[in-house]
Amino acid sequence: MPLIKANYNPPGIFRSADASTIYAGTIRKVDIPNFERERIDLSDGDFIDLDWSKTPSGNSEKLVILLHGLAGKADRPYMKGMARAFNKNKWDAVGMNFRGCSQEINRLYRSYHAGASEDLAEVMTHVLALKRYQKIALVGFSLGGNMLMKYLGEDRSLPENVVGAVGISVPCDLAGSLGAISRMRNFVYSKRFELNLKQHLNTRAEKFPDQLQKKDISACSSLRDIDDLYTSKAHGYKDAADYYEQTSALNYLEGINRPTLMINAKNDSFLSNDCYPVKIAEESKHFHLEIPEYGGHVGFVTRNALYYHEKRAVDFIESLL
């Protein structure tokens, strides 16, 4: 598919990547009815919490599954904003809280990671078993966008109900993106992620003291150290480098066979050059790529309640029906 031309023109201050990223991620308020939580048990004995936001009629046959980013959860403003946008277009929405990302730590030593597409597959199986939704769309943000793109591009048989997908600010080159976020200009962001993950791991160390020690967590001084210590080994990878190589969605994009849109802002300081896979998009029948000049990381602010990426996601999915 040819590249999609973006027409995003943000209010003046939000041409700044930092202003848009920070405002959309931490200051924006989204009014939406409380999610209805459902816990599902996974095949390995663990659990995932799903947060549902349904249309007022309660009888929609269309569903969007939402996947959050690193250190996120289903009640983040970007998740609620997307749920609200789809709800207003008569879609039910369900936010997938990754393992350990709802209020209660998950049962197993493992948690979530950028390539845990098997968990999305189990959520899909659960949704299909409801025998209610004729049309299913998927939207993933940041790390969740990488998980989504990997899921779509793997050698699997996708349900016919899946009409299409959208990824927002997708770090599809994980190693390169780690390098980008580790630059000095992103110090505040990377340090915030690091502290959040350390807090999470300290809680995990209390539950699994034979597998993880707090002194080793404290010794980590970067996101890569955390991935070397825990993320990689807890999920069956040799080290951080092996984890990045095997789970980067960039390796799976050519296998995507459902209409899929990736929106990555040109000024997103979290992304590497390889996170703009122009050639793959040009040669693919199903993978669409849009590169707005502005937007930062999941920060496509507009002058109204509906953000640019939310409108684009809804319009793209609706065009497939």
Image (tube, rainbow, N blue to C red):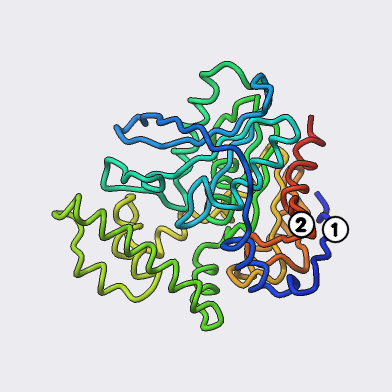
Amino acid at pointer 2: Glu
- Residue visible at 52% across and 80% down? 183
> Which residue is label 2 attached to?
290
Query: Residue 14 or 208: which is nearer the viewer?
Result: 14
Question: As displayed, is residue 200 above or below residue 128?
Answer: below
Query: Residue 53 or 46: which is nearer the viewer?
Result: 53
Taking the image as shown, residue 38 lies to the left or right of residue 301, namely: left
The label on residue 5 is 1
How far apart in space, not on screen, are marks 2 and 1 (Cα)? 6 Å
Provide residue 106's location: percent of width, then percent of height.
Answer: 31, 43
Question: As displayed, is residue 148 above or below residue 245?
Answer: above
Query: Residue 44 or 204: which is nearer the viewer?
Result: 204
Provide residue 72's location: percent of width, then percent of height.
Answer: 48, 54
Query: Residue 172 or 107: which is nearer the viewer?
Result: 107
Q: Are marks 2 and 1 in contact (CB under 8 Å)?
A: yes
**Quarter of the image where one finds residue 275:** bottom right
Provide residue 68's location: percent of width, then percent of height.
Answer: 53, 49
Provide residue 200's location: percent of width, then percent of height.
Answer: 33, 57
Farthest-out residue, left? 210
- Quadrant for the C terminus in the image: top right
**Which is more N-terminal, label 1 or label 2?**
1
